Amino acid sequence: MHVLVTHPVAVRIRAGLPVVGEVVYAVGSLWISATMLRNWPDPNGYWRDTDALAYALLAAVYLPLALRRRFPVAILLSTGLCVAAYFTLGYYHVVAVCGLALALYTVASLRPRRVSARCAAGTLVVLLWGTRLAEPGIGALSVGFVTVATIVCWVAGDGSRRLRELTRQLRLEQEEKARRAVTEERIRIARELHDVIAHHVSVISVQTGLAAYVFSADPPTARKALDTVGDSAREALAEMRRMLLVLREEGTAPAAEPGPPGSGLGRLDELAKRVGEAGVPVEVQVTGTAYDLPPGIDLCAYRVVQEALTNVIKHAPRARATVRVHYGADEVHVRVKDDGSGRPAVRTAPSAGATVPKSTGQGLIGMRERATIYQGTVTAEPAPEGGFEVSLRVPVPRGGGDDADAVRTRRR
């Protein structure tokens, strides 16, 4: 069935159907009008006798209507002139009215209101001229009828035009919405790929280099480094599978970003251990009364910490890092700071609202995009006492809660 519908012959037939319909309508209207003109009784001699000129004028009124959609204003003008001539000669007037009304409707449905309003006024003048041919006693009724008919045709055509414009605008808005959704999904996929791969690949790179360096001199250390490489590779594959599974599920909201069981800030110890094995000691501090975060916010905070520590591995491989997580009453505040020791080059961060330079890669962009989803903010800048600091603040929708002074410190 689909092959038949898309066949070139079927496509050409569908394209030609409107034209055939217009021709059939024009010819059929001419036939009906000519039949009425020939058979309409006129015992009192109100109208001029029907002759070849009457039929010729009717043909000039109705046959051009086949082209009314291509040349609406020109067809209305020609139809109006022919109808005016028909009325002036005094032929039976009713049979010519429908052609002029249809031409007016077409102009109102295809042309701006300022054009169609003038055309409606001209059409009304022609039709009022024809009311002089009405039977005695119904002249006033004829005037009222043609006036109402003109207004109805114009209003109906103008309404059709406005409905078509609204439909086109709605379609454009839907297309734009679909394009934005595709762009947002591409950004989300890129962000997830970066966060999943960059951290683990950085750890693998460092540990592989270490294993190669001490392979002969210190086999136990090389073996431990290779074990870390294997663990990082397996975790990266697991997260990739989880991400692909989420992307394949229909109806998944881009902002939800659900994580696997045990994901988020609950995995900070594991993350600190892995980064420590890569040569960057990490100290984790949690202040306030910890509570369960919404899955999306939990994963957002974890990814920011992960990306910040990945940058420490890349840019300051001999530094020491501190991760501080504070659970406030209505927000969670995460800070990742390194002391800058052993840094080969000083990193700089863009000011708030500035464009992120290429040298920062995609990490800061991804952090800020994640935070924006949850109405949070991310700052990344050199610390006053040296080193580099990344700070995340995210509001947490909850009933409330009190901060506590207890501080838990774990060192890896």
Image (tube, rainbow, N blue to C red):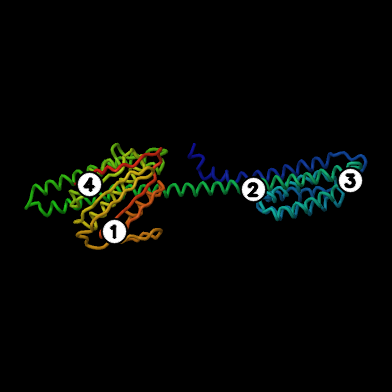
Q: Earlier in the sequence, mark 2 or mark 1?
A: 2
Q: Which residue is mark 4?
A: 272
Please, which residue is most extreme toward the front here?
405
Residue 106: numbered disc = none
Q: Which residue is mark 1?
A: 383
Whether residues under marks 4 and 2 lie with C-beta atoms below 8 angstroms apart, the answer is no
Label 1 or label 3, whichever lies nearer to me, is 1
Mark-to-mark CA distance, 1 and 3: 100 Å
Which image quarter: residue 34?
Answer: top right
Q: Nearer the viewer, residue 91 or 350?
A: 350
Q: Amino acid at mark 1?
A: Ala
Residue 277 picture location, percent across and down: 17, 48
Label 4 or label 1, whichever lies nearer to me, is 1
Q: Amino acid at mark 4?
A: Ala
- Give the left or right position of residue 136, taking residue 157 as reference: right
Label 2 or label 1, whichever lies nearer to me, is 1
Whether residues under marks 1 and 3 lie with C-beta atoms below 8 angstroms apart, the answer is no
Label 4 or label 3, whichever lies nearer to me, is 4
Mark-to-mark CA distance, 4 and 1: 21 Å
Q: Earlier in the sequence, mark 2 or mark 3?
A: 3
Residue 52 picture location, percent across and down: 83, 49
Badge 3 marks a residue whose secondary structure is: loop
Mark-to-mark CA distance, 2 and 1: 60 Å
Residue 193 picture location, percent across and down: 31, 48
Q: Nearer the viewer, residue 8 or 264?
A: 264
- Give the left or right position of residue 147, taking residue 75 as reference: right
- Give the left or right position of residue 135, taking residue 405 as reference: right
Badge 1 marks a residue whose secondary structure is: loop
Whether residues under marks 4 and 1 lie with C-beta atoms below 8 angstroms apart, the answer is no
Q: Residues within 10 Å of mark 2 (few under 14, many from 20)?
A: some
